[in-house]
């Protein structure tokens, strides 16, 4: 009997699918799960799909002179534009731009995709974190353990509510918070752990959940870069997402979501997301205050079209990451760079490599000047090294050895669904030339 390779579109199954399409799992049948996120996959995926030709239309010798890092005009495909325009012709005449049926449909679709009982769509990922913290009971002065290498939104959500960020070190191999460092940072004031699935890599959530249970702490995960991870939300009280257009799945503006299995938490999130009003009863407040943070019906309608491409786009990211790792292996084997590990708990929002601290600026400059290849560093300033009055007052003596070293070495290469293999070849060519010929080795 022929064994099956189930195509769910999630990170673990995508790894199996990649092996299957590369010929490493002969004699297995592809079975595509019935999911809206798989809709585009169903149209292109075949048993004998040639990834390079069928998904990327690879033309090996095509000349490339410029490789942008993350071009805003390529974050959405022409096919998606057509789908969105068709939807807008249905929504715009109704005048229901803020509230409406598309918002409810979008939340239902996400609930099914995430395997979570409740999803509350918000106006941004930042608002999602704030609402989640409020629903979980954050009070002024409560300490929230988190990494220091995330986007500012993570800490800002805590600070805006009067919480106190407590930064702990990372695992330098994953760039995610190190669970072994969490326990020593816990004080009587600690109430929350806020792990971040940075660059699309799943934090060590089982270990984090064990620590949280031991000390009776709440876990709210920042999964703004992690949609598509297998078992996302399994070990958190609340999961938060961002649908900024730069994310693996985005709308055409600012949006986000909260996911939970807890009915009471979901109720509180709804109340806090819309002025403190009773659920489904406008203008009747049942809590002291709330935010104006509901996702717009118009963006939800767009999201219902764009989510159809999520599984396909995340698989493309995985393939591009695998191709980078394979083609740059020689540089790693010679100790010239350090590559991330290809794993089933990654959705490759960004592709980080490590280079020598003293060479990073030269590498970035020469790649751009000599090969037209743009690279970047996410994020350029660590949270505990900002020059704000708060940081100067509270964090100047804080040392996070692994975070600071990794931050000084990290360099991000271009990777996004519309990224072409010819462009990737140019990046690889440039790295080999610059690192082996131009930079001190």
Image (tube, rainbow, N blue to C red):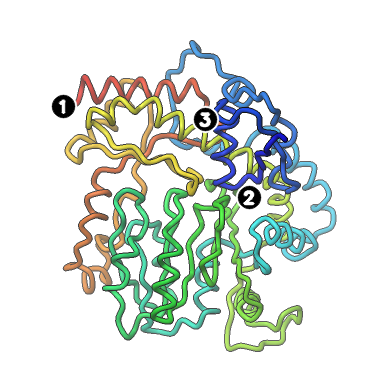
Q: In the image, 335: left or right of 128? A: left
Label 1 sits on residue? 441
Residue 255's image quarter? bottom right
Q: Quadrant of the N terminus?
A: top right
Could you classify mark 2 by the number of other residues whose Cα lies within 10 Å: few (under 14), some (14-19), or many (20 or more)? many
The mark lying in front, picked from 1 and 2, is 1
| Residue 276 image offset from top left, x and y in percent | 63, 82
Of 19 and 43, the residue lying toward us: 19
Image vertical order of residue 173 relative to residue 335, above or below? below
- Which sits earlier in the primary sequence, circle 1 or circle 2? 2
Of 429 and 361, the residue lying toward us: 429
| Residue 244 image offset from top left, x and y in percent | 55, 52
Q: Is residue 159 visible?
A: no
Residue at point 64%, 34% (across, down): 77
- Which sits earlier in the primary sequence, circle 3 or circle 1? 3
Q: Are marks 3 and 2 in contact (CB under 8 Å)?
A: no
Q: In the image, 55: left or right of 367? A: right
Could you classify mark 3 by the number of other residues whose Cα lies within 10 Å: few (under 14), some (14-19), or many (20 or more)? many
Residue 38's image quarter? top right
Label 2 sits on residue? 251
Residue at point 43%, 74% (across, down): 160
| Residue 162 image offset from top left, x and y in percent | 40, 79
Label 3 sits on residue? 419
Q: Quadrant of the C terminus?
A: top left
Residue at point 61%, 72% (across, down): 292
- Which sits earlier in the primary sequence, circle 3 or circle 2? 2
Q: How far apart are labels 3 and 1 at the CA level?
A: 30 Å
Q: How far apart are labels 3 and 2 at the CA level?
A: 19 Å
């Amino acid at each position: 009997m022929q064994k099956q390779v189930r195509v769910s579109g999630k990170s673990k199954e995508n790894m199996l699918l990649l092996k299957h399409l590369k010929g490493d799992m002969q004699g297995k049948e592809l079975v595509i799960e019935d999911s809206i996120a798989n809709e585009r996959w169903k149209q292109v995926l075949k048993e004998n799909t040639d990834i390079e030709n069928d998904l990327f239309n690879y033309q090996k010798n095509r000349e490339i002179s410029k490789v942008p890092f993350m071009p805003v005009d390529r974050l959405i495909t022409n096919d998606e534009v057509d789908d969105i325009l068709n939807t807008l012709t249905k929504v715009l005449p109704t005048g229901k731009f803020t509230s409406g049926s598309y918002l409810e449909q979008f939340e239902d679709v996400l609930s099914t995709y995430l395997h979570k009982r409740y999803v509350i769509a918000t106006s941004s990922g930042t608002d999602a974190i704030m609402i989640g913290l409020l629903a979980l009971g954050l009070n002024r002065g409560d300490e929230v353990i988190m990494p220091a290498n995330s986007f500012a939104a993570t800490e800002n959500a805590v600070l805006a509510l009067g919480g106190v960020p407590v930064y702990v070190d990372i695992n330098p191999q994953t760039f995610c918070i190190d669970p072994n460092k969490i326990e020593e940072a816990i004080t009587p004031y600690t109430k929350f752990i806020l792990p971040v699935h940075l660059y699309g890599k799943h934090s060590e959530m089982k270990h984090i959940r064990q620590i949280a249970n031991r000390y009776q702490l709440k876990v709210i995960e920042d999964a703004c870069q992690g949609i598509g991870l297998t078992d996302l939300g399994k070990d958190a009280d609340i999961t938060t997402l961002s649908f900024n257009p730069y994310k693996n799945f985005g709308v055409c503006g600012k949006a986000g979501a909260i996911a939970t299995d807890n009915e009471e938490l979901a109720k509180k999130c709804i109340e806090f997301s819309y002025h403190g009003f009773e659920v489904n009863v406008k203008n009747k407040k049942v809590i002291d205050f709330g935010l104006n943070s509901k996702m717009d019906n118009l963006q939800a309608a767009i999201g219902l079209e764009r989510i159809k491409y999520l599984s396909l786009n995340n698989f493309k990211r995985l393939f591009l990451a695998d191709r980078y790792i394979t083609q740059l292996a020689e540089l790693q084997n010679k100790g010239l760079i350090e590559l991330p590990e290809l794993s089933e708990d990654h959705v490759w929002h960004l592709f980080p490599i490590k280079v020598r601290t003293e060479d990073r600026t030269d590498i970035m400059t020469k790649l751009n000047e000599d090969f037209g290849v743009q690279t970047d560093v996410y994020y350029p300033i660590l949270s505990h090294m900002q020059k704000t009055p708060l940081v100067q007052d509270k964090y100047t003596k804080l040392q996070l050895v692994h975070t600071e070293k990794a931050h000084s070495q990290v360099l991000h290469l271009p990777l996004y669904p519309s990224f072409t293999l010819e462009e990737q070849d140019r990046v690889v060519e440039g790295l080999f030339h610059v690192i082996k010929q131009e930079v001190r080795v």
